[in-house]
Amino acid sequence: MEYKKANVVVAKSLVGLNMSQATIIAFGLAGTLLLAYSEIKAGALDVSDFIVFNIYVIQLYFPLSFLGTFWRFIRQSWTDVELVLDILEVDQAIKEKEEPIKADIHSGEITFKNVSFSYDKDLPDNEKR
């Protein structure tokens, strides 16, 4: 359950990061479009300058989109590391009770019949040992 909760936290942080990135990119592009429009209207820029300017802006924002992917990898990896560390802290020793129940066995017998084992499943049954 803790792992699921941690994954939900990672997913929520990724959604928040993606939304903030999209907002920054949208406002940045809108601002550059308005700025370029006013400059083109004033005659200071022509359409080719506008295209070059937009290409530069998009190249600046493109690495920002990878930030979300890297952030998700880092958060997911950290969550996985915490899970592994929690598993490593679990005591694997068999705990015996202080006063175990004694077995009441007076007689019995164990019989093995037609028991075989082989790593090679293609061997005939009479060659398996």
Image (cartoon, rainbow, N blue to C red):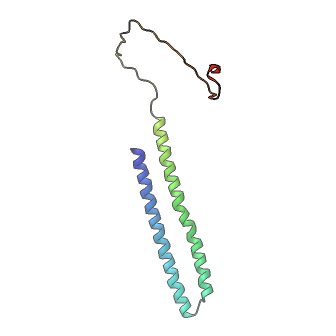
* Residue 99: % across, % down: 34, 16
* Screen quadrant of the C terminus: top right
- Residue 39, compared with residue 84, is above or below; it is below
Report the number of numbered marks: 0
* Residue 40: % across, % down: 56, 90
| Outermost top residue | 106
Residue occupying image coordinates x 37% and y 20%: 97
- Residue 36, compared with residue 105, is above or below; it is below
The quadrant where residue 46 appears: bottom right
* Residue 54: % across, % down: 58, 79
* Residue 13: % across, % down: 44, 58
Q: Is 45 left, or right, of 16 in this rendering?
A: right
- Residue 114, compared with residue 12, is above or below; it is above
* Screen quadrant of the N terminus: top left
Residue occupying image coordinates x 64% and y 29%: 122
Q: Is 123 left, or right, of 97 in this rendering?
A: right
Q: Is 122 left, or right, of 28 in this rendering?
A: right
Residue occupying image coordinates x 55% and y 89%: 39
Residue occupying image coordinates x 60% and y 72%: 59
